[in-house]
Image: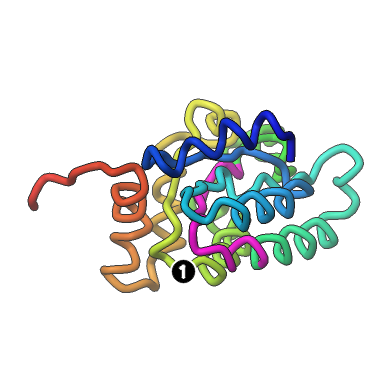
Amino acid sequence: SDTAFRKGYAQLGPLGLSFDAWLYHPQIDELCALARDYEDTTIVLDHVGSPLRVESYASKKDQVFADWSASIKRLASHPNVVVKLGGLGMSNCGFGFHEQAEPPSSETLAHAWRPFIETCIAAFGPERCMFESNFPVDKISCSYHILWNAFKRLAAGMSDDERASLFFGTAARVYKIVLAPR
């Protein structure tokens, strides 16, 4: 909402540039206002909106999910917003995998993260979602190949077109990456 920030932000759309927003779940509604006021600028919500589930939020995980989910649904009503599915391995998301003696399996990650990933996909649709690695930061919780195997598990029931959007199509479109012919 800062005037100086918005003055600079207003330059992105006319230049064909997008804006990646990393914030925490209590700030998602502020991003909704930015998306509403600058419909010509594509916004990429990083890390599913970083639901905070540690410190003062640790005992309120159900409320955090409810608040986060409601904000995600409001944000999805803005067609100029897409979401990166990932970043849940960070310690602030409160899954605690970094505190366990053994690293999680891809099955464990998929099970734990499913409510967040499926909420985003249901709200935005696969064509406005993209899987992200967030490495090396997520390395605190899991290995790179386990992370991507978890994403494969989460996308297993989707169509070929939906998986293509999630794994590369949305990212290519949003970031204007020209894909080589298959």
Q: Quadrant of residue 157?
A: bottom left
x 71%, y 43%: residue: 93
x 53%, y 30%: residue: 139
Q: Is residue 45 left or right of residue 99?
A: left
> Where is residue 7 drawn, in percent x and y?
61, 33
Judged from the image, the secondary structure of the residue bearing numbered disc 1 is loop
> Where is residue 107 drawn, in percent x and y?
51, 56
Check the image and report above or below for 97 versus 131.
Answer: above
Q: Is residue 154 left or right of residue 50?
A: left
Asked if residue 115 is among those painted magenta in the image, a careful observer would answer no
x 79%, y 61%: residue: 67
Mark 1 residue type: Gly
Asked if residue 78 is among those painted magenta in the image, a careful observer would answer yes
x 60%, y 36%: residue: 102
Check the image and report above or below for 137 versus 14.
Answer: above
Q: Is residue 56 left or right of residue 172?
A: right
- Residue segment shown in magenta: 74-88
Residue lying furthest top: 136
Residue lying furthest left: 181
Residue at which label 1 appears: 125
> Where is residue 62 drawn, in percent x and y?
82, 62
Q: Nearer the viewer, residue 66 or 22?
A: 22
| Quarter of the figure with the N terminus | top right
Q: How many marks?
A: 1
Q: Quadrant of residue 74?
A: bottom right
- Asked which colour scheme the image uses, the reply is rainbow
> Where is residue 178 drawn, in percent x and y?
19, 44
Count neighbours of disc 1 (C-alpha within 10 A) and say few if under 14, some if 14 to 19, many if 20 or more.
Answer: some
